[in-house]
Each structure stands twice: as structure tokens, then as C-alpha cells.
Image (cartoon, rainbow, N blue to C red):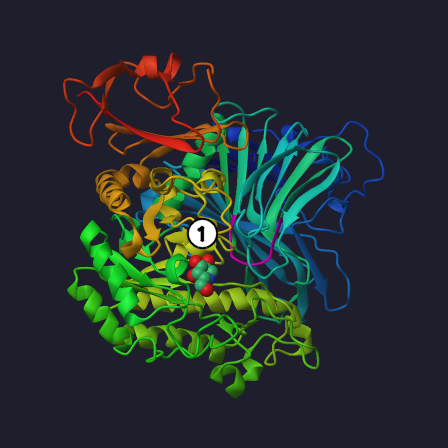
Amino acid sequence: MITFNKETKIFNLSTKNTSYVFGVYADKFLMHIYWGKKIREITSYKPAMTFHARTFSPVEAELYKTEAGSCDNNTMEYPTYGSGDLRHPALNIRFFDGSTTTRLEYVSHKIIKGKPALCGLPSTYVENDNEADTLELEMKDSLTGLTVFLTYTAFNEIDAITRSVRVVNNGNANMNISHILSASVDFEGKDFEFMHLEGTWLRERAVSRSKLYHGTQSIESRRGASSSAHNPFFALLSPNATETTGDVYGFNLVYSGNFLAGTEVDAFDVTRAFIGINPFNFNYLLEPGQSFQAPEAVLVYSDNGIGQMSRTYHKLYRTRLCRGKFRDIERYCLVNNWEGTGMDFTEEKILEIARTAANVGLDMLVLDDGWFGKRNNDWCALGDWYVNYDKLPSGIDGLAEKIEAMGLKFGLWFEPEMVSPDSDLYRAHPEWALHVNNRPLSLGRNQLMLDLSREDVCDFVYHSVADILKTAKISYVKWDYNRNMSEIGSDLLPPERQGEVAHRYILGLYSVLERLVNEFPDILFESCSSGGGRYDPGMLYYMPQTWVSDCTDAGERMALQYGTSIVYPCSSMGAHVSAVHEGAVRNISYKTRGDVATMGQFGYELVMSELSEADLALTKQQIKRYKEYGEVFHKGDMYRINSPYESEKSTFEFISEDKNTVILCHFAKTVHPNAAIYRIKMQGLEADADYVEIKSDNEPTSTDLTYGGDFLMNVGLEQKDAGDYSTSVRIFRKKI
Ligand code: DGJ
């Protein structure tokens, strides 16, 4: 709900358990007043005034005689640079005369039911206007004609507030946006820890925490993609916040390109937190009449620790970010040939894998890289999206039919944003690759990136995929992306617009994806970027799942899935059992590999026909269990009981939507002889209810054990680990 008090000019945005409050001070300036646990209406600006005796801060002319004084001394709602606030600005514009002072004044606002979509960008949504209120505030820089629309949505039942910003040039002269963040929030105090998810290829989204210090602390991407180096997410935690205790303020950007997120703590311990498009190398020209839409930021507050923040993000993203028919249904349990065969396959080999897949009860076979052009290695053929008949004599359509005849669905890999220098496409259209004239091109995985800031290239990319999807029975697309940007330039944009290329690329990508998902609503799309190099809410809007990582070592996956789950739901995590390859970090049992993958979108990535009888039998059991309980992992609430980053154990608990089924997935890294008793204290159960642990995969029997919810949460369940990298998946049913 959003209310506006006409006397105080204060907006109160409230979700079920949280409040976000700011107001129009002195009828002009937006001051931030409060964000946190739900409270009654605030009618004073006092909490926004953070000064005792600050000096050196210039005072904006209109504020000179007010109680507030300089903007530098107050908690501001959407700070600009040049009129007194000397901290990190949310917006910075260079005007036609070269000046960079932006002074925004309140013009008007409207509060509407529901949530409008963002033009050209992914965003969360509502299905019914009663689910949320939206506030649109108009601000103006009267000297230049710059108009800024700040949009806020408060969801009623989900504790999330979204923010976005649109600027319009209503003046007569050009202006350049050099800096446009989506959200900025000032907090009194600096007693926070900065939590974020960092990593690289094979080690994505590791949880990192550090104390806030004076000055600026930030994470960012300059890679052209959200990247595996830093996820576009951070949270401020009260000191020593845990999974179940403490204040947590989460910030996440619904964007797949360059971002900046961070904090600035000033000398008076005021913390400014911000997130948005990275200003580095970004410069957007706005001609008179033109507008610019910045991406959406999703802000989540929890007063019950990190776990509650995660569950809020999970629910919002599962139900109001992901779209299409695959949002709500259980998806395909698949086998992908990549880790089994690489590009070295024949039609017969693929059919052999498919036959075993059908026998063990899988739903789909996915053919990965290597089916097109002369693609026998990763030096060539990206862009040549026509089938290689030497490898696949029946073509993609013929192969798909044969696989369908076995009772399986068929899925196909694409990497449509790329071009190999050794390809017919590059020979015909070298200018379609991102490039800077006369500079040598840098290769990444031996390939170049197509210039998706161009409409003609976007059209080509769309047709590369759509034309194949139209000719064969394809039920799933794996959309890969395996390098980051370099030599960022585009032939079709004038010099003064070259600073727009990286952002226009993302807009181009989104436009292609929008066309494809609308045209092929019955196809499931999965995003991949050498694993999780573009695991962000922007991509989840188009594709409800992402391949977590190219690392399928079950020991590493425990941590990878844990880190990913800080923001993203298990329903979005592609997770497969693969063979243990030569050179793998460790040789982990097939059972453990299956147990670790089971909480994600489950599948296999190996030559199934080479599995032993015992592993095949286990595979059947894993698939049966997954089909029976997949919904609990994907639609239920997740509780992280202990962290692989902090201990040798890692336990996830899932409670089904109807609260009747509970699953504990426990992983032990290292075990010790004669070790102390270890108990798992469960969370989120009904204290007065009884829960039966099911010994078999079926219904409770007389030998099953019954525990009280209060016992499980307070005394805890004894857990005996079978050995290093052992797992257990324990299932409980509530007695009704
Ligand atoms: C990188 C992906 O992460 C892998 O799963 C596989 O699809 C390869 N690309 C294919 O080149």
C-alpha cells in the first residue's frame, strides 16, 4: 500500500511487514526518512537530518533558511550532484553548456493500483492490480527541462519494494547522461556488513562478507554482462546477522549488463547504498524529446536474518519475475550430451544416449554445442546456424522426430550472440561484430561478439534461432554466452553515441528474447553463460532457469547452490549429475552427485549408456524421487541451516507450499572418527504438529519415526554422516 500525507508531504510505502518512507521537504526536495520493519505513519523529517555541526557543505539556496540546511547533511532520496550533496550521486547529467549541476524539484505524483511494465526492460509484475501499489513521482530541473520520473512499487503480500527511474529531455538542447542509478538509499549509521556474491568461471556466487568502512566500497561489472565476477546484488547486514537473526537490506538489479553497486560511508557515519547501471564507460545522449529508462532495482528488507530475505526474493522471482507456462509447472528432467561427448558425437551416439534416457524415465534429450556448420572445435562456425549433415544425417528435424518417437522431448543448444572469425557469417559480415575501427580484435574462447546494438543484427540473431525452432520439434533451448565484451564499438552509431553501445547491446538482447519467448511459448528456454556468468533477474524474466555453473563437482556445487540461493530460487537453478572426468577435483559418489543436484532443475550430463547397472538403478530412483518431490524444492520455502562457507556441513530444508512435506538435504564435506554428535535444528515448522520421517520413498509405515515440530526445531535431529562428501535426503510428512 502507498499513502501520501498532504500536510507533511510524506509518502508511506508499506508491504506486509516493512515500511519505506520519504517525503517532499520544503515542497521541493526528496528526503529519505525510513526503511525497515513496518511502523505506523511517520510525520516528521527529523529522522532524515543527520547533522550536528557539519561544515564545508554548501547549502542549496532554497534550503538555506530551513532546518535541514545542506543536502549533504540529510538522508536524500535520489541525490544529484552540484547543489550541495557531495556524496555519491544517483544522477549526473552534462548539459549542452558543459555544466554538470542538476537540481531536481518535485512537480507532482500519482499513486496507482498495480504495476506498469518498464519499456524495453525486464521487470517484476503483478497479475492483479490489487497485488501492489505504484507511485510515480515527477521531478524537474527547471533551468534545463530535464524531467525525472521516479517509480516505486510496494507489493502487498511480498516484502519487496521496486524502484526505477526514467528521464526525459523536455528542454531544447542535447543533454548527456553520465550517471543514472536505479536506487540510492541513505541510512543513519555505518554498523553494517556488506554481503555480496563474487567469483569467476567454475566458482560463481561465493558468499563474501566484510565490515563497512568509511569511504566507498563497491562491486561492479565492466564486462558487458552482469558476470560471474560479481552478481548485481548486495545486502547490508546488521553486525553478525545470521540466517535467522538481524536486519538485512537486500539490493538486486534486474539487468544483465554493466552494473555498479556499493556504499559510501561519510564522516558522520551516514551510509549511502546504491545500485544501477555502471557509469563507467557509459554516456547516453538525450536529444530534445528523447527519454531513457533505467532498469529496476528490487529492495528487500528482513528483520529475521538472511534466510527471510532470500525467501522473499525467491517468492517474488518465482512468481512475479519468471513468466510463461513454465513458471508454474514442473519442468523437464533431462540429459544433456555436453559433458559426455563434447562436440565429438554422431547421430547414433545421441540416439544411444536417448534410448537409455527413455529407459530410466527422463523427459528430454538436449543436444549441446557442435551440431551446426563445421563446428568440430570451438575455433569456428558460430553464426553458421545450419545443421551439419555429416554428423547428423537426419538433420535436426529428423533427429528430433526419432527422439520424440522414443517418448522423449528434444532440446537444442545455441550461442546466438556470437560469431567465430572462421565462419561464413563473419566472412559475409565482419562489420556485425562489436569492433573499434582499425583496432585489432580480442578473442574470447576464440570468438567475437555480435553487435546487438544494431537492429539488423538483432533480426539476424532472432532468425538464426526462430527459423530452426519452426522446422523441428524442439521443446527446449539452451541459450549460451561464453565471453565478455572488448573493443566496444558499433558502426551505426555516431561518435557521441559510442558510450551507449554496451547498454544498447543489452536492450537488443532483451528485444530478441522478448520476440522469441512470445513466439514460442511452449519452448522452455534456459540461460547459460559458461555456467552462471549471467545469472541475474534480467535473464530470469525471459528464461526461468540458468545453468548454475560448468563446475559439476558435487562438493563445489554445494557451495555454488548455497551462494546462488542467497537471491535466486532453486527453481531457477539448472543442476545436473555428470561423470567424474579425468582431472576432476574429486571422485564423489554417484549417490552424492544425485542428491546434490536434486534440489535444482535436475538432469544428467553424461553418456548414460555407459553407466553401470548399479548406477542405472540409482538413476531410476533419483528420477522417481525427483518427480515425486520436485515441487517441494521448486515451490516450497527454503531454509539454509548451515553454510558450506562456514562449516563442514551444509543443510538445506524445504517446506512444501501446503506445509505438509518437509525435505532435509544434508551434505557432509569431511567427517572425523569418533566425532561429536551432530544435530540439525530445523526451521519454519509448526511447533504443535507432528512430523513422520518416511523411511521409504512411499507413504509412512509403522517403522517410521514421528517427531514433534517443537522437538525438531529446538532439540534437533541427530545426523550421522556416512563419510567424506556423503549426503542424505530425509523426507518428512506432517501428520494431519
Ligand atoms: C559452455 C556451457 O556452460 C556448457 O554447458 C556447454 O554448453 C559449452 N559452453 C558448449 O560450448
Residue closer to the observer: 284 or 216: 216
Q: Residue at horizontal 38%, vertical 52%?
A: 545
Q: Residues within 10 Å of mark 1 (few under 14, many from 20)?
A: few
Q: Residue at x 40, y 19 (%)?
A: 681
Looking at the rendered structure, the secondary structure element under dot 1 is: loop
Please state the extent of the stretch shown in magenta in the rendering: 253-260
Quarter of the N terminus within the rendering: top left
- Image position, residue 187 (x, y; %): 64, 33
Judged left or right of residue 521, residue 33 is right
Near-viewer residue (594 or 612): 612
Percent x, y of residue 397:
25, 74
Amino acid at pointer 1? His
| Residue in the image at 81% along x and 32% along y | 54
Camera sees residue 328: yes
Which residue was labeled with disc 1? 581
* Quadrant of the image where one finds ligand 1: bottom left
Q: Is residue 508 above or below residue 558?
A: below
Q: Is residue 708 left or right of residue 90?
A: left
Q: Is residue 258 magenta?
A: yes
Q: Of 609 and 677, which appears nearest the observer? A: 609
Report the side of 286 relative to 375 (left or right).
right
Looking at the picture, how far across and down is residue 614, in whole percent? 26, 42
Please indicate, yes or no, whether residue 114 appears anywhere in the rendered image. Answer: no
Quadrant housing residue 273: top right
Under 8 Å from ligand 1: the CB of mark 1? no
Q: Name the quadrant containing residue 515.
A: bottom left
Q: Position of residue 487 (x, y in %)?
A: 65, 71
Q: Quadrant of residue 502?
A: bottom right
